[in-house]
Image (spheres, coloured by chain):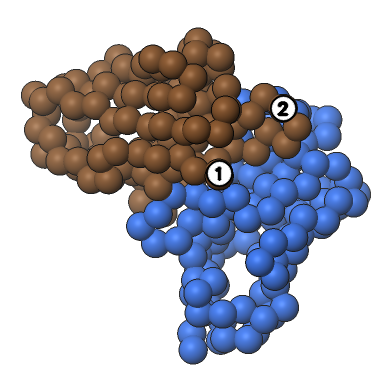
Chain colours: A blue, B brown
Amino acid sequence: GNSVTQMEGPVTLSEEAFLTINCTYTATGYPSLFWYVQYPGEGLQLLLKATKADDKGSNKGFEATYRKETTSFHLEKGSVQVSDSAVYFCALQVRPGAQKLVFGQGTRLTINP
Amino acid sequence: DTEVTQTPKHLVMGMTNKKSLKCEQHMGHRAMYWYKQKAKKPPELMFVYSYEKLSINESVPSRFSPECPNSSLLNLHLHALQPEDSALYLCASSSQGAGYEQYFGPGTRLTVT
């Protein structure tokens, strides 16, 4: 079946550190891949997406590259801020227009000043 | 404007009450979703409406009743809920066109007493 595996959290870093949150997936065909972020007490916000192999999604200093050969979509940021503290969800959609998002378990990130 | 609004923000109800959650979007999206999210878990899909017709029901108990009065509005009617139904209820919408990413509202925090 289709599934997403994220690195287990929680992850705690100091401000200005480099961030990587690992995400790997299992899916038939060529899924679209997403990162969502959920700040405390809020809904999910779309952070970035990639729809085909080798695409790089980027937003707010975050980046992720769709790697079909390793079935991965790792989230990176060069210098994190306290305001990046949140829960990050990796998700896949099996085909364009498919209405189901398959989520990973989420990774809680805390950035200390 | 990529905004989905939800009301109320918080709701406390007894097990014999009837209440409704409301969701609205003005992005012209033709697919709308209800999710349930428990603490420290990813969202779980409940219902999907596509072009105002129910297209997916993830075997949700009948005490939850969705309604889509028009393409901009989505309701979730609640009746005879159980304490284990306490959760964050998220609404989302998506276009049927390119991208297909889902945009989430801020959620309604429901407590069943």
Q: Quadrant of residue A107?
A: bottom right
Give the amino acid type for the residue marked by disc 1 in the picture.
Thr
Q: Residues within 10 Å of mark 1 (few under 14, many from 20)?
A: few
Asked if A83 appears above or below A28 in the picture, the reply is below
Q: Are marks 2 and 1 in contact (CB under 8 Å)?
A: no
Q: Position of residue B109 (x, y in %)?
A: 28, 45
Q: Is residue A109 left or right of residue A31?
A: left
SS type, badge 2? loop
Q: Position of residue A112 (x, y in %)?
A: 48, 85
SS type, badge 1? loop
Give the amino acid type for the residue marked by disc 2 in the picture.
Gly
Q: Which residue is mark 2?
A: B97
Residue situated furthest bottom in the rendering = A113
Q: Is residue B2 left or right of residue B13?
A: right
Can you tell which mark lies on residue A52?
none
Which residue corresponds to the image point at 74% horizontal and 60% vertical from the top-left? A58
Q: Which residue is mark 1?
A: B2
State which quarter of the image contains the N terminus of chain A.
top right
The chain ID associated with circle 2 is: B
